[in-house]
Image (spheres, grey):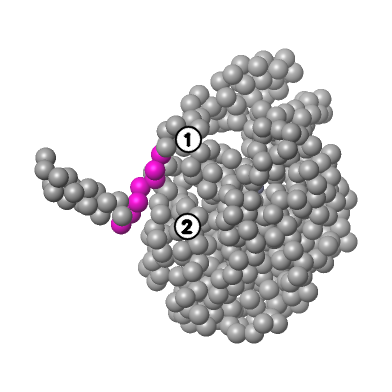
Amino acid sequence: MSKLALLILAAAIVGVFGEYPSYEVKSDVVKSYDGYQVLRITPKTWEQLSYLHDVAMTTTELDFWTYPSALNNTVDVMVSPLQRSSFVPELETRQIETKVWIPDVEAVNRAQRNEVSDVPSGFINEAVPRYFTAYQRLAAINNLMNTLASQNSAIARVESIGTSTGGRAINVIQIGTAGTSKPIIFVDSLIHAREWVTGATTMYLAQYLIDQYNANNATVRTLLTNYLFYIVPVVNPDGYEYTHTNERLWRKTRASNSGSTCVGTDPNRNWQYQWNPSLGGSTNPCSEIYSGASAANQPETKALQDYLYANRARIRVYIAVHSYSQLLLWAYGYTSANSPSHSVLSARGTTAIAALTPFYNTRYTLGTITNTLYAAAGNAVDYAFVTCGITLSYTIELRDTGSFGFQLPASQIVPSGIETTAFFLRLAQIADTE
Ligand SMILES: [Zn+2]
């Protein structure tokens, strides 16, 4: 083949992939989950629950996708073949009910790699924007934020609230009509890197608000007149990119830890309020729930914390978006006690979730973090609720409960976007009437 023909061929290939770049797999660095499974374990006695709790709090190897919380509540644990061969006999000895939930993690992973794209900007005003038919890389998320802002400068702007350890900007898109003193609805996602559907869902909210404002939707027009929506889709950009380039199921930040070869801190155990590794966190850098060497020492946590604090007087609603399990949670996460606002949070949360359910009959469970899920001291919602004094502070754990966990197919982005947007809007409406 002549040089010219090669050049033309190369140009043709670049042309194809330049339009819709495919997911690039670097096989030498990408972690394979060959042989990995996720077990679904059901503790039925206090001894079994206590055993699982001890393992979850001390392990540096097993990856708990969900943590032990109560009798008969399932616990999902990802195991390598080697871990399986030692852990399963322990479970059998204690007669703990165990099923294989996801039999082949790598197969799901492979399927999902084909659902990642790098669409360079939004496809605004499409009936189903193509952007939301795939999971987007960080650059594409930032690109859509900037495109939305530049094409709708009267109601949207983007700014950086800080920088990650790896030097990546943590961006907020602010959406609403002019007015710098208006109350704020604050939504953030992807503080945990592997919870891909959360970032896709909050970007769906951003796109929806702008599209519907432009389409003269009366509800959205009223909300964007009365409020500013502040949306931080990717709190942990280093971790998020790492889930695309290296380890799909990475959770933490990517900061190195002195004295350890293990990387990363759980940024949702790192907040200043009631920071305490012994309450649902860990002092071990190799743990998935490592609380960090000190409170707010992670730049991602610190940036978000400072930004919330600076705007606290105007923030009417705070929502930290996580996945998975379909839960709506509120303070506290550091103690099992109920807060003075418990009944208000329960009532408002119930009303807002009722707006979500009708679309696909998605069912949520509601309660405090500690009593519904598990202790998680040093979390965002306790900080927002107590330190910032934002009563309507929630964590929402999005889809699903039964099939995919973190590896939710991209075909569920739009349904998740539709139903969760209804929840966000209802919560904002409730806050508006108070
Ligand atoms: Zn999470």
* The image quarter in which residue 265 lies: top right
Q: Where is residue 24 in the image (x, y as percent from the top left)?
A: 39, 43
Most foreground residue, 122 or 391 = 122
Disc 2, SS: helix
* The image quarter in which residue 172 lies: bottom right
185 within the magenta span: no
Identify the residue position indicated by label 2 in the image.
Answer: 139
* The image quarter in which residue 133 lies: bottom left
Q: How crowded is mark 1: few (under 14 residues within 10 Å), some or many (20 or more)?
A: some
Range shown magenta: 19-25
Disc 1, SS: loop
Q: Position of residue 302 (x, y in %)?
A: 73, 57
Could you tell whether 110 is left or right of 277 in the image? left
Q: Which residue lies furthest to the front in this view?
A: 3
Amino acid residing under circle 1: Val
Q: Can residue 209 be seen in this view?
A: yes
**Image quadrant containing the N terminus:** top left
Residue 117 lies, with reference to residue 277, above or below; the image says: below
Identify the residue position indicated by label 1 in the image.
Answer: 30
Could you tell whether 16 is left or right of 30 in the image? left
Amino acid residing under circle 2: Ala
Residue 99 lies, with reference to residue 18, above or below; the image says: above
The chief SS type of the magenta part is loop
Q: Who comes first in sequence, dot 1 or dot 2?
A: 1
